[in-house]
């Protein structure tokens, strides 16, 4: 059985990780991002508490106990979807597939939740109206392409659909950005550290 992180929740933290294809969700325990999480417990506790309705004190306790941030993320999602206590869910962890099954959280629930969170993150990050975003999805555009096109459109003060139309089989998004006088490094800066997910503001 493949790991739950790879099968269901890869990329949930948003940003470039959502679109990394073969890249998996897990970071090694000694990754810089994990170290930063340990050093910024209050910020992460507030972040997870606000996003998933989890008691911030429980999140902070997990961080104090050096629980990996990816496990905290997955336990928070399963707690939210199942209505169970976060700490109880976290204590169940052997394999997240088994935990989800025990909690009665289906793959379809997780898929729907993941897509909803992804859509909200892209719309918020790019300033794109959520209804416009969903309309573009229905038109067959991929989330990654909508994300990049919306960034270019915002920087160049253009219509996102016009920007999407510029992307062809024989060019790249870098070419499209350049045609509008936009520097891709400006609109999509490389993330700091090892991890590429959305991060709370550092205190």
Image (cartoon, rainbow, N blue to C red):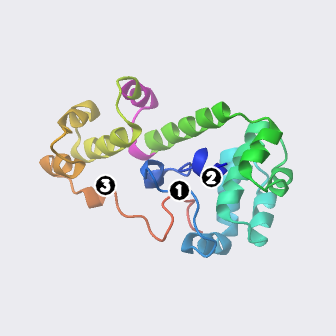
Label number found at residue 24: 1
Circle nearer the N terminus (1, 2): 2
Q: CA distance from mark 1 to mark 2?
A: 7 Å
Q: Is residue 30 above or below residue 16?
A: below
The residue that disc 3 covers is: 187
Q: Secondary structure at mark 2?
A: helix
Label number found at residue 43: none
Q: Position of residue 32 (x, y in %)?
A: 55, 74
Is residue 64 visible to the viewer in this orientation of the structure? yes
Circles 1 and 2, Cβ within 8 Å, touching? The answer is yes
At 57% from the left edge and 73% from the top edge, which residue is drawn? 31
The residue that disc 2 covers is: 5
Tell me the crowding category of disc 2: few under 14, some 14 to 19, or many 20 or more residues within 10 angstroms, Cα based: some
Whether residue 132 is in magenta: the answer is: yes
Q: Is residue 70 above or below residue 50?
A: below
Whether residue 82 is in magenta: the answer is: no
Quarter of the image where one finds residue 46: bottom right
Report the magenta stretch's main SS. Answer: helix
Relative horizontal placement of residue 172, taking residue 105 as reference (left or right): left
At 55% from the left edge and 52% from the top edge, which residue is drawn? 13
Q: Nearer the viewer, mark 2 or mark 3?
A: 2
What is the residue that sits farthest to the left in this orientation? 179
* Residue range highlighted in magenta: 125-136
């Amino acid at each position: 059985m493949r790991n739950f992180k790879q099968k269901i929740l890869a990329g949930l933290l948003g940003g470039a990780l959502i679109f990394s294809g073969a890249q998996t969700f897990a970071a090694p325990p000694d990754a810089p991002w994990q170290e930063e999480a340990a050093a910024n417990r209050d910020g992460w506790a507030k972040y997870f508490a606000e996003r998933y309705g989890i008691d911030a004190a429980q999140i902070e306790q997990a961080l104090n106990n050096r629980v990996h941030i990816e496990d905290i993320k997955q336990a928070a999602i399963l707690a939210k979807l199942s209505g169970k206590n976060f700490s109880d869910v976290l204590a169940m962890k052997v394999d997240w597939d088994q935990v989800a099954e025990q909690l009665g959280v289906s793959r379809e629930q997780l898929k729907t939740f993941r897509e909803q969170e992804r859509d909200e993150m892209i719309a918020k990050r790019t300033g794109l109206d959520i209804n416009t975003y969903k309309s573009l999805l229905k038109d067959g555009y991929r989330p990654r392409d909508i994300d990049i096109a919306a960034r270019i459109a915002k920087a160049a003060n253009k219509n996102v659909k016009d920007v999407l139309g510029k992307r062809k089989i024989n060019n790249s998004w870098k070419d499209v950005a350049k045609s509008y006088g936009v520097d891709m490094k400006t609109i999509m800066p490389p993330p700091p550290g090892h991890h590429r997910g959305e991060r709370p503001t550092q205190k």
